[in-house]
Image: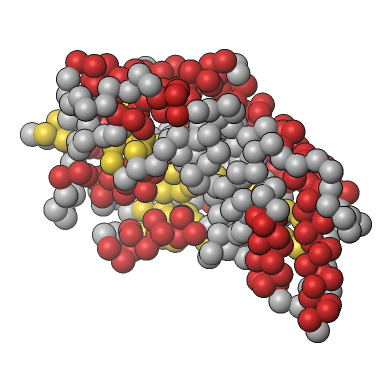
Amino acid sequence: MVTTHPDARPANPRFSSGPCAKLPNWTLDALKDAPLGRSHRAAVGKAKLKAAIDRTRDILGIPADYRIGIVPASDTGAFEMAMWSLLGERPAQMVAWESFGAGWVTDVVKQLKIDATVHEAAYGEIVDMAALNYDNDVCFTWNGTTSGVRMASGDAIPADRAGLTLCDATSAAFAMDLPWDKLDVTTFSWQKVLGGEAAHGMLILSPRAVERLESYTPAWPLPKIFRLTKGGKLNEGIFKGETINTPSMLCVEDYLVALDWAETVGGLAGLIARADANFAEIEKFVAATPWIDFLASDPATRSTTSVCLKFNDDRIVDGAAFAKGVAKRLEAENVGLDLGAYRDAPAGLRIWCGSTIEASDVAALMPWLDWAFHAELDAQAKAA
């Protein structure tokens, strides 16, 4: 039991699950080459946007015949665009094991009113992906940012599926190995694993998704920022850097800087290794500490980026108040910022362990969790 302040402190106390920590040693000077005050349609702007697309493909190993576009409104905008543009041609299978997946269910069932079967699992659990009907379109998150539960693999998705798979991979891309042959639509944002800035989304389409866009017209009207086709054909410009609306060239520059850094740590393999090493520090702490556990019950589905923890101690009277108290103490000491569980999730802590985090900082945080837990327990006892 730790009753005094630990000696070591994380060099960077930022463990927010979004926007996430900037890459190590990042400074504003890194953005000095941003073409500010220039049109994104000028040659310099187009070149930057195309570089962002091309280098995303290279680092993530995205097949050459998949389209990659930069779209508005972060991962949310990208996934909404995909659902509103592609769904409705056949029934849908909606999969939710955390709050963002549940949000996609609401859009499809209540807004688009598509014939849909909803598959849900409680926080900490995951839906049996092998039980889905892949003759339907299937919408799911790869990594549940608010539950700490991820897909163990894409093995359950059949290669000969008739429907499309739509995957929200925002807290998985760049930190987990995504099976592109099993994913027809994939979305993510810059603000997660690479610590980029918000408001821009990435939309990745397989040839099957493109075929659907060119052969099916939804029954509902599409806002301008959702329109992926022109005259019944894919708007190829979107996938060459000709964005639907005006992007921030400052944010684009920041993403390019993050991609530069990704290459210095070994590309995708190096990024995955960094996230795995961060998660391993928490895994060691949980194994040695009886009062805390992962929210995800199955080790095979525990997220290595958005790590969600719950308190296991009979002395805790009010779980929600206790968890908030622990997080508040860590923030007051400036050793762990933004560690509270997501508002819709069970009470506990959420520690971002994506690739921009240093394992040494995660290791330094762990004794502080012990200190904050016992300090809050003592305060609770005194207030009783």
Q: Does residue 43 sit above or below 305 in this rendering?
A: above
> In terms of image quadrants, where is residue 248?
top left
Q: Give the image location of residue 371, x and y in percent.
A: 82, 56
Does residue 338 appear left or right of residue 188 in this picture?
right
Q: Taking the image as drawn, is residue 117 in sight? A: yes
Residue lying at 76% horizontally and 63% vertically, measured from the top left: 311
The residue closer to the viewer here, 174 or 118, is 174
**Which residue is more in the foreground, 90 or 359?**
359
Spot occupied by residue 102 in the image (x, y as percentages of width and height):
45, 60
- Residue with the most extreme bottom position: 384
Name the quarter where the C terminus is drawn. bottom right
* Image quadrant in which you'd find residue 201: top left
Q: Is residue 261 above or below residue 101?
A: above
Is residue 236 in sight in this rendering? no
* Residue drawn where x is 62% and y is 51% of the image: 337
Q: Residue at x 20, y 24 (%)?
A: 38
Residue lying at 35% horizontally and 43% vertically, measured from the top left: 199
